[in-house]
Image (cartoon, rainbow, N blue to C red):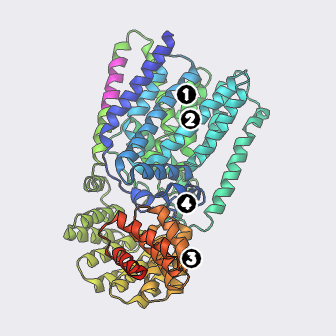
Amino acid sequence: MEKRSAYLIAIFLIIAAGVLVYANSLNNPLIWDDGGLIVDNLQIRHIGNIPRLFLQNVYSQDMVGRFYRPILMTTFALNYKLGGLNPYGYHLINLLLHLANAVLVYCLVVLICGNQGLLPFLTALLFAVHPIHTEAVTYISGRADPLAAFFGLTSLIFFIRYFNSKTHSKRFYYLGSFLSFILALLSKEASVIFPFSFILYEVCFSKTRFKPKSLYKYIPFFAALLSYGLVRSVILSNVKEAYLVTKFIPLTNRLFTIPLVILTYLRLLVSPFGLHMEHMEYMANPPGSLFEIRVLVPLVFLIVIGFLIWRSRKRFMLITFGSLWFFLNLLPVLNLVPINAFIAEHWLYIPSIGFFLVFSAVLTKFVGFKSVRPYIIIFLFGVFVLSGYLTFKQNYIWKDHLTFYKYMLKYVPQSSRLHTNLGNTYLTLEMYEEAACEYKEALRLNPTGVHAVYGYINLGVLNEKLGDEDEAIRMYEKVMELDPTFALAFIYIGKIHYRNNKYLDSIKFYRRAVELVPTNANYWNDLAGAYLKARKLKEAAQSYEKALDIYPYTLAARVNLGGVYSELGNPKRALEEYMLALRLAPDMPDIYYNIGNVCAQLGNLNLARQYWEKALEIDPNYADAREKLDRLQELSY
């Protein structure tokens, strides 16, 4: 009973510390990639669309970015269902996930090393409050890491219970481990490493010598990995790869960066100052030789660490496990296969558990010596207070877009992407001169690369805001010169022509956009609207249907398609579309009015009356519905 109380007190303190340091993040806005993943992502806006999330990339409509994370996107869809785009709910889920993970870390260390009192508590508390995790917790789109950690740690805990169990519960633990691993895989790609973590546990802590034949228990996990790889490749087969700077750096050069990257990660964990999102180290100037001093020194350092781990593996197996966990879980993000950066702080979320375990294990060894115990306690107190303070302070950097981008530019003034995003912030705030300066600076830094495309796009949008549509078109045409496949430039020119009633011209540009990105429902809606204005009704119907195939919950498209079918003399199809629209908006008087019109077309005046009356019931000032009912009344006399 006493042991149980100690566990509960430890868990309570871990949760309380996590809440304390992250409470000020709950009202921060949606920022950075939250725009593409959440704000502009139609696919998360209806709960009925969740099955489709398992059949597409995370950005859903735009065929760019080969990320397959359906569980992550499902959580965003649930967030949207509960609170729309209110960021509080998204932040709350991130925080709850992080707190759950801190508790899981505590349980994992208890399970691995038994009740060693302080060690599990220190490891979990460090995990809960360390500022390196702000990028995974405070940043809503960073949720993939806590989500994968939640399912991955659950899977590992189940596996350890299975491994050590001699009861009938053994099968239950194995099934729990396997299913949790599948959910981790569907949360983030880096979860592929978890089966190797299970093997690491067995090698380190098995009471019997590890034998290759014991690998049979891992067969379902590796079969799941193979199946996942096949499914992912099929689903993303038509998805365009996002622009990866590291892809243009040869493998040998990427390998030379690995010692530098690992040392940078260790530095960030030991000294978490100057944290930011845009680590551009080694991008412009990756090492070209193993014998460069900047490569050789970290490499020698890591070799020494590896040697010490190997020499002490029998005496300090827990430290060996923690060290190997750190390096093993870094493997997916070391650019052996090109990814979108060399360094990202949120990639440390899972590997850091090993670092905190080693740190805590070393310190608890020293706590055993009475002569140094007071100093160790003071040191630990200082570490936790400083970590908590830095985390709390770091959350304020995310409080608004202006603060966020200005802060990051202090560390990476050469980032054209940051200047572009700061320009977008100024544009939203209607600070047009400042926006223009940032866009021009972005173009100066990167006149031809992928971010130059966004620079010209944004200058085009700015010129539209200033009323200079000719200059806006010139900017969009510049985008087309740089990247003829950039669909948004065609959409923006199409919109300008549409506003000027040049519907045939707008159709030409919209059609090119849907050819380039046929998975974007908004683009098909734009094309359908232009066809409708040009009185090309059959083409309008086809385009609306295409949009609704991609995302069936767009109310305007559904209503407009009903109207098109009504004009085409197909009242039955019109009625079908209006009825589907009614499910989406049961309190919208226009839909009832339109259904009444279709019923009248079909000769059912009594039913038409009911729908017009319903429209008036919802909106007593609905003049058109009143007029229809008055005419019907006159006919009845």
Tell me which amino acid carries mark 2. Leu
Q: Are marks 2 and 1 in contact (CB under 8 Å)?
A: yes
x, y percent for residue 186: 59, 49
- Residue at numbered disc 3: 573
Q: Which numbered circle lies on residue 108? A: 1
In the image, residue 386 above or below residue 40: above
On the image, the x and y values in percent for residue 284 come to 42, 61
Mark pair 3, 1: CA separation:
58 Å
Q: Quadrant of residue 618?
A: bottom left
Residue range highlighted in magenta? 376-386
Is 377 located above or below residue 603 in the figure?
Answer: above
Please give the residue where the numbered disc 2 appears in the rendered image.
153
Instruction: Name the front one of labels 3 and 4.
Output: 3
The amino acid sitting under disc 3 is Arg
Q: Residue at x 44, y 48 (%)?
A: 142
- Please report whichever mark, 1 or 4, sits nearer to the chain's N-terminal start: 4
The mark closer to the camera, 4 or 2, is 4
Q: Nearer the viewer, mark 3 or mark 2?
A: 3
Q: Earlier in the sequence, mark 4 or mark 2?
A: 4
